[in-house]
Amino acid sequence: MARPNQARLNLAALRHNLALVRRLAPRARAMAVVKADAYGHGAATVARVLAPLADALAVACLEEAQALRDAGISVPILLLEGVFEPAELQAAAQQNLWVTIASEQQLRWLEQSRPARPLRCWLKVDTGMHRLGVEPGQAPAFYQRLKACPNAADDTVLSTHFASADDLSSARTARQLALFESACQGLPGERSSANSAAVLAWPASHCDWVRPGYMLYGNSPLALDHPNAQPLQPVMTLVSAVISLRDVAAGESVGYGAIWTAARPSRIATVCIGYGDGYPRMAPAGTPVLVNGQRAVLAGRVSMDMITVDVTDLPGVGIGDEVVLWGDGLPVGEVARHVGTIGYELSTRMPARTPRVVVVA
Ligand SMILES: *Cc1c(COP(=O)(O)O)cnc(C)c1O
C-alpha cells in the first residue's frame, strides 16, 4: 500500500455550503473567495464547482486569476489586492478580471494606463481594519475620479472589510458598517462588506455582494457555536493511517526531545503524517485525532513525517487503521485552537506533498 495520506475533498459539501450562503443572504450576489489555492483545497478543482453557482470568484492577485483562466474558468474574478504594477492592468482587462482600487497609486495607474477595455473596479474603503483602502472621507472623490476615468467601467462597487466580524460581542462591526454607509452616502454603486463571519452573523452587512471564503470550505469562523453555522459541511478531511504500535511502560517518554512521558502503561500508535504533510508541528500533546472514528490524543512532538498518538483507551487499534486529523467528525477549527491558530492557516498550509483526492464529486 502506498503512503496513505490524503486531503479528501467532498465537492458536494462545497455546493451545500454555497447554498447556505444563498439562504442566509438571499438578496445579495455571492462572490466565492478562492485565494491561496482555495484555502489549500485546490483552486482549479474548487473553482470548477463554484464558478457555475457563484456570481463571481475572488483571488488575491493576477497570478492566481491567470491560473484559473488557464484552467478554463471564465466567470468574473476580482483581484482582492488589486494590481501590483501598472502592466498588470492590461492583463486584467484581457482576462476579464475586476480590480480592487485601494489607494491613490492604484487609481493613478488606472488613470494613466491604456487597457484594451474598461475594467470593473471595486473601490475599497478603510472603515477600521487599517490594512488596505481609502479613507472614508476620500471615498466620494475616488468614486468621482473612477466615474470620470475611461479605463474604469461604469459599475464601480464600493467595498470594505471587517476586522472583528467573528466576534459577536464586539461593537466594531456595527461601527464599521455605519462608517461604510456614511462614506458611501449618495454614491450609486453596489456595496459589499460581508466575509464569512458577516454572512453568518451580521445580516445587516450583506448589502449587494457577499464575499464568503472560509465558510464555503465548511468551517465556521465564529468564536462560538452559532445556529447559522450548524449546517456547514467540511470539504476537506485530512486522513492518514497507523503504521506502528507499541506498548510503553510508565515513565518512558515518546518522540523528539522526550517531552511526553507516559504516566501509565500506554499503547502508542505511530501515524505517518507530520509537519511535512501539513499537520502543524506546534500541535501539543492532547490535540485530538480520530482513530477508526474514535477520539484519541497526540502524545509527544510532531515529527516531519509522523505523529504518535495515545490509544491506550481504544482497544483493537491495528496497523493500517484510518486516522482523521481534521474534517468529518473533527472540525479543523477545534484542532487549530489546540495549536493556537485558526483553521484558515491549517488548511491553507497544506503542502503539495499531500495529495488532494476527490472522494465525492
Ligand atoms: C479573504 C477575504 C474574504 C473572505 O474571508 P473569509 O473570512 O474567508 O470569508 C473576503 N473579503 C476579502 C477582502 C478578503 O481578503
Image (cartoon, rainbow, N blue to C red):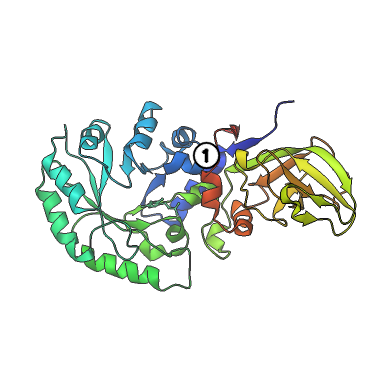
- Residue 139 visible: yes
| Residue at the image point whose x is 77% and y is 55% from the top | 260
Residue placed most toward the observer, 295 or 244? 244
**Residue 128 placement (x, y as % from top left):** 32, 66
Q: Which residue is mark 1?
A: 41
Disc 1 is placed on an element classified as loop
Q: Is residue 355 above or below residue 255?
A: above
- Residue 152 visible: no
Q: Residues within 10 Å of mark 1 (few under 14, many from 20)?
A: many
**Residue 353 placement (x, y as % from top left):** 58, 32
The disc labelled 1 sits on which kind of residue? His
Q: Quadrant of residue 336?
A: bottom right
| Residue at the image point whose x is 23% and y is 59% from the top | 134
| Residue at the image point whose x is 45% and y is 55% from the top | 196
Compared across the picture, whether 211 is left or right of 109 comes to right
| Residue at the image point whose x is 58% and y is 57% from the top | 230
**Residue 189 placement (x, y as % from top left):** 21, 54
**Residue 171 placement (x, y as % from top left):** 41, 74
Q: Is residue 22 above or below residue 321?
A: below
Residue placed most toward the observer, 24 or 226? 226
Q: Quadrant of residue 67?
A: top left
Residue placed most toward the observer, 253 or 42? 253
Residue placed most toward the observer, 275 or 63? 275
